[in-house]
């Protein structure tokens, strides 16, 4: 079903008018939505862009943000100085990011540093972790904020020693707000009031508020917790993956991350954290009203009613899609709008195989829909702390790993990537394939406004091999654009949809002819998509910033060379996660 017919079926006058908008007409006449020659698949240790484009690094893991910081140490000598130095350099594994404008061709970039790769970070390749290593890793995670200056050619350069430059790490004090503030489940030995957390971890993707703050989203936080002794795992810990032997990085050497000693500490992670990039002295805030789960990103939309709406995906197999609607309206001033409001979870209706249907947003509110003491929920704090359990009780639809959510700036459509789910056995309408190793992209539109609780949906594409194969890929997939595992998602102001991948890069078997992870550009109207770029060996392509004039793009290359793969990107030595910048040689609009 094409988008025009979908809109007609849904009787969405406001969306239908989008197709006749001057903005889209201008884009299609003068700057074709897909005006570039698609690149071939890439299996080499390089970063490939189309003919007529160029790309170069902006900043890499461990590049100094301050003159006093040391350059990256190829000897990987992790001592006290290295631990301290990590607090003044770019963090590892850059992911979601946003730009915040300043005057005089300057801007701030806030970027997540999701996690670390011990096999790359240490000479011992993660096989002999000690407490110094843990401290070094903790200072390499979190968020990096730094100033950049735009040059005449459109590229950016780092402004060292800017008053705005700072790191937010796994040791940074962060306040707690919203319904879970001060709850018993958030109290620990070190924080008997349950109001102050040290650190933010596994910061995946992000969001940007209308009042100019950055939202960083905590995803697979359970990977950082372990236990030195057996403990009695409750239903919540089981649902969030908190168990003995789960930790991947040896952080339980720091007692705070030892669940057998601090069972409440995991409850203090899995939140959306708000940061003011313009005030380097401000304390970040964990906004608990938005729920606790494995957040991918937080797509913020200012509804026509002036309510703030935040769309979120929970990145795990069989988990859910959420939205938050603020209680109060945005009046142009910065306010604590994310502390009060209603958290919803999506329930999809329809028949398997139709690839379309209706849906509803169900309230996750204490006292409603079975969220009461009989089911273990004694307060709204219980609901948000255990949002996953609450969503299951109210009948939300289990999805194939909901990741990035992106709202079209020129219509009311919202898109979400469902990356993959090789555990899918029971089909449902929005997840129509068993053993969904390739993933798909779904889109929905709320009736009349973003705050409405009814919506219509369809599937924009089913990734995988060609349509005539057993995978059942959608018709907009062909031999020139096959791929797997859509992940990052971003619209530019002309409604080009940029799609990033984080999938299998073996280029063999079920993944033959897909190459390294990559980024596509799609026309939401026609469904056509073309491969725009491809990254180096074993990387994920994640995080994107598009300048206001759509002439410069920043794209994240995460974990090149992971798991011992043969990469030396980008400098021919230790592989390092890097933000790349791209421009068109003629200075034109990207993608045109």
Image (cartoon, grey):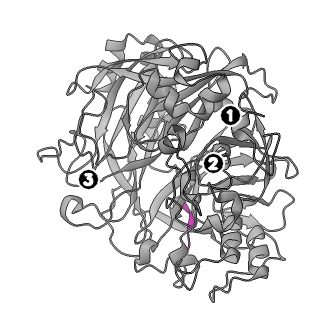
Question: What is the x, y in percent for residue 335?
Answer: 80, 28
Above or below 584: residue 560:
below
In this view, the residue in front, 178 or 478, is 178
Q: Which residue is mark 3?
A: 482
Cα–Cα span, label 2 and label 1? 14 Å
Q: Earlier in the sequence, mark 2 or mark 3?
A: 2
Instruction: Report the side of 106 relative to 497 (left or right).
Output: right
Mark in front: 2 vs 1: 2
Q: Is residue 186 visible?
A: yes
Say few, some or many: other residues with alpha carbon within 10 Å of mark 3 (under 14 / 14 to 19 / 20 or more). many
Mark in front: 3 vs 1: 1
Cα–Cα span, label 3 and label 1? 39 Å
Q: Which mark is residue 409?
A: none
In this view, the residue in front, 493 or 76, is 76
Mark in front: 2 vs 3: 2
Say few, some or many: other residues with alpha carbon within 10 Å of mark 1 (under 14 / 14 to 19 / 20 or more). many
Above or below 210: residue 543:
below
Which residue: 72% across, 22% down? 340
> The residue tagged with tag 3: helix, strand or loop?
loop
Cα–Cα span, label 2 and label 3? 39 Å
Q: Is residue 177 magenta?
A: no
From which residue to which does the magenta span run? 576-582
Q: Is residue 151 visible?
A: no
Labels 2 & 3 near each other (Cβ < 8 A): no
Q: Which residue is mark 1?
A: 288
Image quadrant occupied by the N terminus: top left
Above or below 553: residue 236:
above
Q: Earlier in the sequence, mark 3 or mark 1?
A: 1
Instruction: Report the side of 471 relative to 580 (left or right).
Output: left
Q: Which residue is mark 2?
A: 266
Above or below 465: residue 524:
above
Q: Which quadrant holds residue 330? A: top right
């Amino acid at each position: 079903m094409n988008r025009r017919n979908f809109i007609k079926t849904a009787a969405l006058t406001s969306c239908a008018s989008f197709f006749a908008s001057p903005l889209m007409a201008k884009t299609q006449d003068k700057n074709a939505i897909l005006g570039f020659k698609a690149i071939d698949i890439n299996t080499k240790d390089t970063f490939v862009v189309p003919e007529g484009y160029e790309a170069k690094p902006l900043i890499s893991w461990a590049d100094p943000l301050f003159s006093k910081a040391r350059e990256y140490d190829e000897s990987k000598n992790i001592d006290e100085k290295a631990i301290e130095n990590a607090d003044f350099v770019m963090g590892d594994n850059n992911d979601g990011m946003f730009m915040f404008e300043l005057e005089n061709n300057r801007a701030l970039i806030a970027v997540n540093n999701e996690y670390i790769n011990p096999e790359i970070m240490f000479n011992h390749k993660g096989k002999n972790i000690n407490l110094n290593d843990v401290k070094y890793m903790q200072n390499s995670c979190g968020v990096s904020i730094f100033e950049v200056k735009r040059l005449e050619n459109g590229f950016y350069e780092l402004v060292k020693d800017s008053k705005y430059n700072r790191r937010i790490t796994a040791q940074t004090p962060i306040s707690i707000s919203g319904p879970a503030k001060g709850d018993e489940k958030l109290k620990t030995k070190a924080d008997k009031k349950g109001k102050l957390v040290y650190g933010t971890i596994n910061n995946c993707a992000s969001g940007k508020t209308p009042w100019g703050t950055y939202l960083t989203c905590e995803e697979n936080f359970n990977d950082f917790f372990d236990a030195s002794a057996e403990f009695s795992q409750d239903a919540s810990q089981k649902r969030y993956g908190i168990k003995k032997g789960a930790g991947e990085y040896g952080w339980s050497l720091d007692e705070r991350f030892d669940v057998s000693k601090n069972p409440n500490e995991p409850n203090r992670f899995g939140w959306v954290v708000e940061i003011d990039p313009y005030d380097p002295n401000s304390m970040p805030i964990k906004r608990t009203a938005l729920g606790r789960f494995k957040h991918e990103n937080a797509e913020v939309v200012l509804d026509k009613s002036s309510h703030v709406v935040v769309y979120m995906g929970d990145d795990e197999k069989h988990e859910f899609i959420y939205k938050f609607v603020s209680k109060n309206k945005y009046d142009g001033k910065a306010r604590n709008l994310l502390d009060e409001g209603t958290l919803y979870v999506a329930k999809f209706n329809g028949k398997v195989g139709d690839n379309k249907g209706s849906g509803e947003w169900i309230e996750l509110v204490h006292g409603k829909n079975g969220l009461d003491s009989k089911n273990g929920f004694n307060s709204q704090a219980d609901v948000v702390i255990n949002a996953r359990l609450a969503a299951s009780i109210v009948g939300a639809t289990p999805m194939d790993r909901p990741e990035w959510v992106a709202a079209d700036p020129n219509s009311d459509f919202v898109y979400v990537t469902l990356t993959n789910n090789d555990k899918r056995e029971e089909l449902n309408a929005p997840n129509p394939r068993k053993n969904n190793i390739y993933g798909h992209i779904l889109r929905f539109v709320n009736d009349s406004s973003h705050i409405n609780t009814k919506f219509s949906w369809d599937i924009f594409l089913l990734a995988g091999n060609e349509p005539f194969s057993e995978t059942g890929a959608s018709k907009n997939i062909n031999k020139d654009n096959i791929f797997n595992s859509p992940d990052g998602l971003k619209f530019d102001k002309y409604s080009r949809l940029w799609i990033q991948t984080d999938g299998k890069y073996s280029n063999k078997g079920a993944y033959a002819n897909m190459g390294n992870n990559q980024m596509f550009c799609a026309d939401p109207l026609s469904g056509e998509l073309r491969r725009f770029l491809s990254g180096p060996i074993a990387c994920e392509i994640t995080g994107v910033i598009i300048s206001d004039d759509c002439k410069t793009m920043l794209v994240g290359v995460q974990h090149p060379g992971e798991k011992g793969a043969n990469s030396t990107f980008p400098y021919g030595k230790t592989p390092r996660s890097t933000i790349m910048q791209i421009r068109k040689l003629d200075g034109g609009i990207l993608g045109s």
